[in-house]
Amino acid sequence: MNWLYLAIAIVAEVIATSALKASEGFTRPVPATLVVIGYGIAFYMLSLTLRTIPMGVVYAIWSGAGIVLITLVGYFMFRQRLDLPALVGIGLIVAGVLVMQLFSKATAH
């Protein structure tokens, strides 16, 4: 169940961050409301996850997955392009999360 909480936290954070861009500095009420609700859900779900999964592991997965997903949202919704060094950096983040998941005993609960 904790991994489901983490997945919900990640999705809520990505929605909130996307709405933050769309809120145009909190001048548009609907996206601004989504920001507040999305981050509220994200942090609540993150707090539930932290009950049993180590903080460093949770944060690495949450931030790593969030970076990848928000990059995809930026590309498809906002037409934001990244250069090769940025993509390589994101790839390294993904590789780090995979190493933790596949080889670290800290994630086994």
Image (cartoon, rainbow, N blue to C red):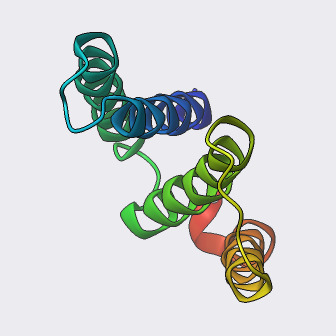
Query: Relative to 58, is 55 on the left or the right?
Result: left
Residue 99, by quadrant, is: bottom right
x, y percent for residue 67? 58, 59
User: Is 6 placed above or below 57 here?
Assistant: above
Residue most extreme to the bottom? 85
Of the pair 54 and 7, the residue shown nearer to us: 7
User: Is 52 placed above or below 23 here?
Assistant: below
Residue 7, by quadrant, is: top right
Q: Count up the numbered dots.
A: 0
Residue most extreme to the top? 30
x, y percent for residue 106? 57, 70
User: Is 32 placed above or below 55 here?
Assistant: above
Residue drawn at 53 percent across, 27 percent down: 8
Residue drawn at 58 percent across, 26 percent down: 1
Residue drawn at 40 percent across, 40 percent down: 21
x, y percent for residue 30? 31, 10
Of the pair 76 and 45, the residue shown nearer to us: 76
Q: Quick check: can you spot residue 109?
A: no
Of the pair 77 and 96, the residue shown nearer to us: 77
Q: Quick check: can you spot residue 93?
A: yes
Residue drawn at 72 percent across, 83 percent down: 92
x, y percent for residue 96? 69, 79
